[in-house]
Amino acid sequence: MKFLHLVLANLGRHKRRTILTTASVALALFLFASLRTVVTTLDAAARFGSVRRLVSTNATGIVFPLPLSYANKLRGVPGVEAVSWANWFGGRYGDNKRFFAQFAVDPESYLEMYPEISLPEDQKQAFLRERSSAIIGRRLVEVFGWRLGQDVTIQGTIFPGDWTFTIRGIYTPTDAVINDDMLLFRHDYLEERLGRPGISGWYVIRIDDANHAAQIARTIDIQFRNSTAATKTGTEQAFNASFATMWGNVSLLMGTIGLAVVFAILLVTANAMMMSSRERTREVAVLKTIGFSDRTVFGLVMLEAAAIALTGALLGLGGAKYLYKATNFNGGGFLPGFDVTTDTLLLGATVALLLMLASGLVPAVRAARLPVVQALRRVE
């Protein structure tokens, strides 16, 4: 620590360069943490799901409905404990600048199927009593300023018309992977408005033993194989993972971009350190003349690189961690639970350490090996 004043003095020699270099490192690590968090969030979403929940969709595609009459048949399958269903609504609110998902669900069975959707009991009962009621995630209260008892009109796209719902509940997810900006309304209200076509988008099935999931899924699909709407049944985790794969190989894309950004900043930082080292050739020679060893000179240069890299890491990684948390960022509803994990912070710190070594090692070795006479002659 006794040489700290020398390190600070050298960093303050060109304040603008030091600030810009540190800012570059901070930006690189901020982007690195952000891009990696996209990957970890998608991975967490793909892994979400109870091992005892299956999802059954139309074998042709999820956009094709299933008959509502399948519910009773599914309940009769050995190993099935409970059945619920839902429909994607796909409506628009206001100017449609803020997207949020809307689902028509069978209210009682759906809330029982998903205890992760935490709702006060009085609000739950109000939702179960009123056919045109809806429950919303707490984020929608923050975004739109909605409140309990308010009427909200959604413009239907898949199901045309103006659909007015009365907000009777505000839920809070107990698992961050579940969106907190959904609107859930009653499926019987959808059926009533459409003239009771008897359709559901997909079924959620709770089974008694996760070890029998494959067998039960196969039994379900065999049962409806020759019907007008064959089914494709799998675990809830597989169902969620299928949505993640729709984004393509996001892990490779984000990883490649992150590495490219870090490498580009490495070149900037290394260049700045080399410039600083060349400008201080006379000073290095004087330090050695008055008794500073090669090891001490080497350490001073490395400390400068460490100060820049670690300060940048603190700003970049800390900024990513607290900015997204403070703004409750969720990628417009597509990345629920978006949060920079501890593993990402540790990996970012490792990247900063490697950045320090890569950018500071060459100028540090050069300064340590610099002959005093040659350095003084070059300056003169």
Image (cartoon, rainbow, N blue to C red):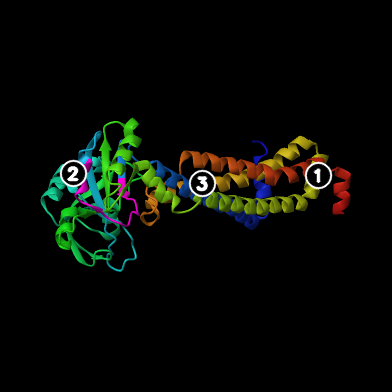
* Helix, strand or loop under label 1: helix
Q: Which residue is mark 2?
A: 72
Residue 199 image offset from top left, x and y in percent: 22, 55
* CA separation in Å, label 1 and label 2: 89 Å
Cβ–Cβ below 8 Å for labels 3 and 1?
no
Which residue, as the protein is rendered here, is positioned at the far front?
226
Look at 49% across and 46% down and name the residue there: 318
Disc 1 marks which amino acid? Val
Judging depth in this view, the residue of 179 and 355 nearest the camera is: 179
Q: Is residue 298 above or below residue 164?
A: above
Picture quadrant where residue 286 is located: top right
- Circle 3 is placed at which residue position? 317
x then y, percent, for residue 216:
30, 36
Report crowding for label 2: few under 14, some 14 to 19, many 20 or more residues within 10 A (C-alpha). few
- Rendered image quadrant of residue 15: bottom right
The relative height of residue 130 versus residue 108 in the rendered view (above or below) is below
Quadrant holding the N terminus: top right
Q: Which residues are magenta?
A: 56-74
